[in-house]
Amino acid sequence: MTTAISAKRDVLSVRDLTSAEMRGVVERAMVMKHEAAGQPLRGMRFALLFEKPSLRTKVSFQIGIEELGGYSTYMGPDEVGLGTREPASDVARVLSGYVDGIIARVFSHEALKELSEYASVPVINALSDWEHPCQTMADLLTIRERFGPLSGQKLAFIGDGNNVARSLCLGLPPLGVSFAIASPDGYELDRETVNAARASAANGAGVTMVTSPTEAVRDADVVYTDVWTSMGDEEETAQRRTAFQGYTVDEALLSKAKGDAVFMHDMPAHYGEEVAEGMLEHRQSLVYRQAHNRLHAQKALLELIYGNG
């Protein structure tokens, strides 16, 4: 039988965490990065339910769960078949009898919500087409390490208003971190997300949508980009390459941000498209630290969900 927990706690969105919880996860992750974390997941079992291929997400969750005393079993695209081989509701009910948590990397956020509805154990969004909250928590940890307490910084996102951009837009302003995004017409973030971010902003944080990358990076502490074509949108690759001309982050664009600004990218990178060759190794790049911080941020998130026991 799976381990009973006092209350089922899902994290499908960064909005499922309060500002205090996000700060707590970041601060705890900083400690976990340098000290043994104990084993709050001792004896617990987790399903890694992945419809999409993965490097950072898969490895960081597998290692993190093991370091916290738990065990994970991985189910890749050929084994999942959400909505085709089996409905998500059946998958959720069956897995709930085997494991203590479901960590799902899916194409459709609607499938993720269905898993959450029918699972009796916590469901964590390891990426959907709508949000990527675990990436945002690692990003916050990276910004915290570089600039100190979270508040007063500005992050400029250059590119598609995709799942990564959405989680950053929703997650940063409540902590006092301003968010600006530059996207070509037709690829901007949805108005609902932007309005929600503005409504939750604290300590004077702003939320700005523009079309000019140069305008977005002005006074930015962090210049961030992601692929122009996300997994699942490959049929739009040629169209997007045309639409996003002028949105490549290179040294010239980074130089228009603050002098001590850093460069971030959630990876994988498509060199020659959203990022110029050499930028991940640039002296101002934190990209590899950002990738490594997935491990520590997710460990802290798991500890929050399952307690400090």
Image (cartoon, rainbow, N blue to C red):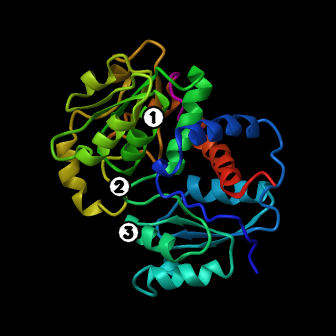
Distance between mark 1 and mark 2 Cα atoms = 26 Å
Report the residue marked by disc 1: 174
Secondary structure beneath label 2: loop
Residue 285: within the magenta?
yes
Residue 111: within the magenta?
no
Using residue 149 as the reference point, say whether residue 172 is left or right of it: left
Label 3: how many residues lie within 10 Å, few (<14), some (14-19) or many (20+)? some
Report the residue marked by disc 3: 110
Label 1: how many residues lie within 10 Å, few (<14), some (14-19) or many (20+)? many
Tell me if residue 277 comes above or below residue 154 in the rendering.
below
Quadrant of the snapshot with the C terminus: bottom right
Amino acid on which the number 1 mark rests in the picture: Pro
Q: Which of label 1 and label 3 is nearer to you? A: 1
- The mark found on residue 309 in the picture is none
Of residues 93 and 245, which is closer to you in this image? 93
Read off the magenta span: 283-288
